[in-house]
Amino acid sequence: MKRKFVEQAVAYCTRSKKPKLWTVPLPGRGRVTDLDYIPATCTRNYMLNDALVDWLKVHHERQSTSSSSSQTGQGFVSFIMERGIEFENKLVEYIDSHRLPVVTVSEKITDETVQQTIDLMKAGTPVIHSAPVRNPKNRTHGIIDILIRSDFLGLLVDDNPLTGEEMLIPAPKLGHEFHYVVIDVKFSTLPLRADGRHILNSGSYPAYKSQCWIYNEAIGHIQGYTSPYAFILGRRWRYTQKDINYSSFSCLDKLGVINYDKVDKFYVQQTKDALQWICDNKKFGHQWSVDPPSRPELYPNMCHDSGKWQGIKEKIAENIGEITSIWYCGMKHRNIGIKNGITSWRDPDCISENIGLRGVRAPIIDSILSINRQNKDKIRPKKIKHDMYNWKKSCNEIFVDFETLSDIFSPLDELPRQLQTDMIFMIGVWYKVKSEWKYKRFTCNDATYEEEYRIMDEFNSFIIKQKTPKVWYWCAENKFWNRSESRQYDIACGQGDLKRMDRISKDWNLGEWRDMCEIFKQEPIVIKDCFKFGLKPIAKAMYKHGLISTKLDSECTSGMTAMVNAWKCYEDEENPATCHVMNDIARYNKFDVCVLEDILSYLRRKHV
């Protein structure tokens, strides 16, 4: 069957694009008619407990935000979206060439394109890509990534999730001895449950499950049979069973299963609630308030980054004393607080016990709440008791930060295989020469594992010359190093490079890794106007109060932005390691290592 094409990339209208709510008539200027359909992607914010964003999109006057986090990761998000589109297009091309014939419908939802999808289903087309559908029963519509005949599913993926009996369930309205099932394509690794079949409810997957249910219902209306299953096709999959990890690098090896009759039954009612929320927001939202919130959905969820809306959320959260702004406090704890009559962390009754927090984190959270409900102390305690890592004593020490590339940059020309290609591309060091502190960086000239080995080996040699100092970092660097070290050893093994294997196993010994974040959490050390234990929030609050002098001087504001900018350097620049953008990333990296030393020196001077 010959594949049909449209003049533009069909994936531009899939779930990869940012959904936009419709324009709502202002009061007195008309009313909403029953002709409006709700896009399947519009349930996303509600399903991720971030429904406030829906209200902001429709009812908040758009304005520029310049908060520290409002633009954080926006370049990264855009890049992920672009890669998702590319992944879907390449995947469909591969399927059409190597597995099953594919017919692409349209990137637009019109009467004609919806009918074309129905006609292709009636004709028994094996695989339908970018299929527009409407469901008049619940007034929803969307564009399905892949519609496939149930009896052809085993030809698409190696591990067929349907039984022989399930494959041959007929579709009465189509007149076939088979039916169609929905597959949504996601540029991510599928997080499967221990059964290796169903999908966990982590990350954005609650939104994906909701979206697929809407598609499923639309297809059920068309064919006269609604499958209990929908599927997600990711870049690869992984799961853990009895402490044993299982994974695959093939995107066509296994599908993630959504079962709306059993495991994922919860999402049926949750999606219906989301659709009702969207209708309520459209009709009555102009009557609501966010300060204070007039509905539970209007509380800002500060555990979720909302991109360009994050700045407005931060302002609302600050005004109302949003409980999810606090370290390790989520929706569950806020809801418990509301049940107990507590709606703000400024309320003296807002303590860990009253918001459902127990265990070792409870006293830490109470310390954060306490210092932020007073105006005398800028930092607590005055004298720090614990001496983890023997940190109170100055010694031979350096401060380290890594910049990394995740495997979202993996090439797509080897589908269905999607190998992991994450790597360290920059290592920054703040070290002392006699009485002067200096910055040194090790930067890959190309985004290759050979270059990663070079900078890791040079860094290790540098450490040895420094007489194996104590290595300070914040939170994750030790994990980055260990993962890359293991990978480099595996590469050397695969190449039979005994010399390199010997060097890695015997000479790469960085000695004393020390996580400064653990010092803050153990005491705990808490700072006025700081609610979490990230390096950037702590440094910002300490600088604000005049406790340290190090300030970020870079156009790059996050590790995610650094990642995307670095990749573009490696793709476009003749000398990427020394170009302007990479030098700016180095300034960002330098801030992280400098501020570590600044913070530690302050604590030694004032709180020992």
Image (cartoon, rainbow, N blue to C red):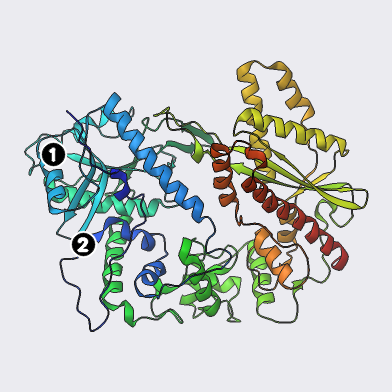
N-terminal of the pair, mark 1 or mark 2, is 2
Whether residue 362 sits left or right of residue 415 in the image: it is: right
Which numbered dot is residue 49? none
Residue 514 percent location from the top left of the image: 77, 48
Spot occupied by residue 571 in the image (x, y as percentages of width and height): 54, 37
Relative to residue 79, is residue 166 depicted above or below?
above
Q: Is residue 360 visible?
A: no
Classify residue 299 by image quadrant: bottom left
Report helix, strand or loop for mark 2.
loop
For mark 1, give the secondary structure. Answer: helix
Crowd band around label 2 with a 10 angstrom C-alpha radius: few (<14), some (14–19), many (20+): some
Rendering coords of residue 357 (x, y %): 57, 66
Amino acid type of the residue tagged 1 in the rendering: Leu
Kindly tell me whether residue 383 is visible in this rendering: yes
Q: Based on the displayed image, in which of its 4 quarters is residue 117 positioned?
A: top left
Q: Nearer the viewer, residue 291 or 440?
A: 440
Q: Residue at x 16, y 53 (%)?
A: 110
Image spot of residue 424 (x, y percent)? 64, 39
Q: Is residue 136 left or right of residue 475?
A: left
Who's the residue at 85% across and 47% down the image?
397
- In which quadrant of the rendered image does the N terminus lie? top left
Provide the residue designation for mark 1. Answer: 120
What residue is drawn where x is 29% and y is 68%? 278
Q: Amino acid at mark 2?
A: Tyr
**Which residue position is annotated with label 2?**
37
Vertical position of residue 125 compared to residue 546: above or below: above
Is residue 125 shown above or below 198?
above
Q: Nearer the viewer, residue 186 or 523?
A: 186
